[in-house]
């Protein structure tokens, strides 16, 4: 008999018709023998265990707890109670002051005046790839402008 644990056929262990061959297999197979011994030790420990007695007011406390309705938002807010707020208030105030100081220091000033327009155009050397991309972008914008403009003759 092949080991049911190694072949992932654990349901064979629960088949009562195969109990005789299973007993032989457990004696012969080390893995199954160790598994059966572990199960026996768990069963013995559970037999020796005694549950502690239930207190007299257990039912009353249980029903009171069930009746107490806890809203979902109360459940989420509970960890952030008064003690949390008292500890985090100085941290929040410091963060607010740092943010205000950063915005005050780095606030954008007035825009610089645009350079004066000159009649001559400046020629600038561009890498070939950048010039090609610029031309493609210009063609795309011209095509877009052509599609967006409506001729007066097309309106009729």
Image (cartoon, grey):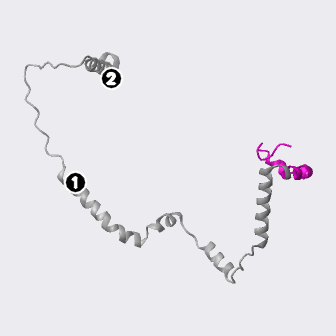
Q: Is residue 140 above or below residue 32?
A: above
Residue 86: where, in percent of width, then height? 36, 71
Q: Which secondary structure lies at badge 1? A: helix
Please tell me which residue is depicted at 48% across the width and 68% down the height of the picture.
78
Q: Which residues are magenta?
A: 1-26
Residue under pointer 2? 148
Quick one: quadrant of the C terminus? top left
Q: Which secondary structure lies at badge 2? A: helix
Q: Nearer the viewer, mark 2 or mark 1?
A: 1
Q: Is residue 147 above or below residue 59?
A: above
| Nearest the eye: 53 or 101 | 53
- In the displayed structure, does residue 126 sit left or right of residue 113? right
Q: Which mark is residue 48?
A: none
Q: Quadrant of residue 152?
A: top left
Dominant secondary structure of the residues highlighted in magenta in the image:
helix
Residue under pointer 1? 102
Residue 9 magenta: yes
Q: Earlier in the sequence, mark 2 or mark 1?
A: 1
Asked if the residue under mark 1 is in contact with the one under mark 2, i.e. CB atoms within 8 Å, the reply is no
Measured in 3D between alpha carbons, the distance from the residue under mark 2 to the one under mark 1, in whole angstroms, is: 44 Å
Q: Residues within 10 Å of mark 2 (few under 14, many from 20)?
A: few
């Amino acid at each position: 008999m092949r080991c049911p644990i190694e072949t992932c056929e654990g349901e064979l262990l629960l088949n009562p018709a195969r109990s005789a061959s299973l007993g032989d297999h457990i004696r012969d197979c080390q893995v199954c023998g160790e598994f059966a011994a572990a199960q026996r030790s768990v069963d013995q420990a559970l037999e020796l265990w005694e549950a502690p007695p239930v207190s007299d007011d257990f039912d009353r406390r249980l029903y009171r707890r069930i009746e107490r309705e806890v809203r979902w938002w109360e459940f989420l807010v509970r960890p952030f109670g008064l003690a949390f707020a008292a500890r985090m208030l100085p941290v929040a105030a410091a963060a607010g002051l740092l943010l205000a100081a950063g915005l005050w220091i780095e606030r954008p000033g007035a825009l610089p005046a645009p350079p004066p327009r000159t009649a001559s155009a400046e020629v600038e050397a561009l890498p070939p790839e950048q010039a090609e991309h610029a031309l493609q972008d210009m063609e795309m914008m011209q095509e877009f402008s052509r599609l967006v403009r409506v001729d007066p003759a097309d309106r009729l």
